[in-house]
Amino acid sequence: MERKQRLVRERIVQAADELFARKGFDNVSVSDIAAHADVGRTTFFRYFGDKQEVVFAKEQQMLDAIADTAHLGTAGAAATAAEAVEQLRPLVLDLCDRATTDPEAYLRHTELVELHPELRGRDAEKAQLVAVALGDVLIRRGTDELTAVFAAQIALACYQTARRMPGTAASLTDNTRAAFDRARDLGRDATDHPAGAK
Amino acid sequence: MERKQRLVRERIVQAADELFARKGFDNVSVSDIAAHADVGRTTFFRYFGDKQEVVFAKEQQMLDAIADTAHLGTAGAAATAAEAVEQLRPLVLDLCDRATTDPEAYLRHTELVELHPELRGRDAEKAQLVAVALGDVLIRRGTDELTAVFAAQIALACYQTARRMPGTAASLTDNTRAAFDRARDLGRDATDHPAGAK
């Protein structure tokens, strides 16, 4: 995206954030956001499909960031599911870092989503899109599709676990890393406690 | 739910299914569904929050079924994450069986969700509600919250992997079982291929 476009996009996001915080998500229209950002409605819709999308502007950037990663191509095909999950670990931890760069903005976002059922749906959908993007990275590296889809869902599960843990924005990355460790150790646990023994 | 209520609910779901198939989801209103089911709009909204909810009537039954499971209380607290995931395995496989009892209805549902972005969001949200319900089962059995949340997300990841595999309704349960096997074996893979070696 060109610099000017990035700035307009950023201005819309900031205008929306301000209005949501001041008047409440439900009481803000696309026209309000456009006016506050000093752009027309047409311009708004060039950047965002609807009001909800502005809330997930960061998620869209994350999806773009994941797609870019695939082109780096430092790693090859993963031979096992465990290796595939480990290939996704640094990508997901990087997403956690990006999501929490501004801790207050992260908490505002989390609260907003929690309070609005329609945003929870969009949030869950974006998370699945992240999983698809992560799976695609593995597939482009030559990993078979089943392993890639499975590993991406496990990676998403680690991230979702961390998001559901009580804790501040600062602990999101650490909690996600801990969940990846747990996923890696699943089979080791199972050796001590035979699966299905109960 | 009383028998009469169940029948009314069922009639609304069936009326909606017929209208969605005949006219397309977007061209059917709550009033259309109510009229076709021979109930008033007020009655419709006693059972469903909106038109989308009718599409996920089965998911709501699943959530109720999971909550019921917790009261059976045959298993105790899980000592490890692996054991917690294994405790959820039969529950999730049972959900898969229920979801695909009527294979054609399952495929119609899948297609409908895939074609409508707003339904994809609701679908992803329902999946997260299933994870919350699964985690609650473990917590009520005495498993610590972190392990419960993690295991529930891993169980959901197995289910989501299977849903994303090409295949008919008939293979959903088997594919989910295979994903649970893969999750159980993650640590074993890792022993052969040291994590982070690549």
Image (cartoon, coloured by chain):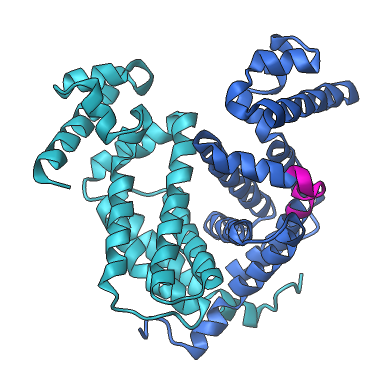
Chain colours: A cyan, B blue
Q: Is residue B93 visible?
A: yes
- Quarter of the C terminus of chain B within the rendering: bottom left
Numbered circles on residues, count:
0
- Which picture quadrant has residue A49? top left
B65, above or below A150, in the image: above
A185, above or below B157, in the image: below
Name the residue located 35 percent from the left edge and 35 percent from the top edge.
Answer: A53
A70, above or below A1, in the image: below
Q: Position of residue A2 (x, y in %)?
A: 13, 46
Q: Name the residue nearer the viewer: A42 or B172.
A: A42
Q: Position of residue B196 (x, y in %)?
A: 37, 81
Left/right of residue A121 with respect to residue B63 in the rendered view = left
Left/right of residue A150 with respect to residue B6 in the rendered view = left
Q: Outermost residue toward the bottom?
A: B192
Name the residue located 70 percent from the left edge and 32 percent from the top edge.
Answer: B21
Q: Magenta segment, which residues? A: B96-105
**Residue B147 inside the magenta-drawn segment:** no
Q: Is residue B76 visible?
A: no
Left/right of residue B76 with respect to residue A130 in the rendered view = right
Q: Position of residue B22 (x, y in %)?
A: 71, 28
- Which picture quadrant has residue A46? top left
Q: Position of residue B106 (x, y in %)?
A: 73, 46
Name the residue located 82 percent from the left edge and 21 percent from the top edge.
Answer: B8
Name the residue located 41 percent from the left edge and 62 percent from the top edge.
Answer: A134
Q: Outermost residue toward the left?
A: A4
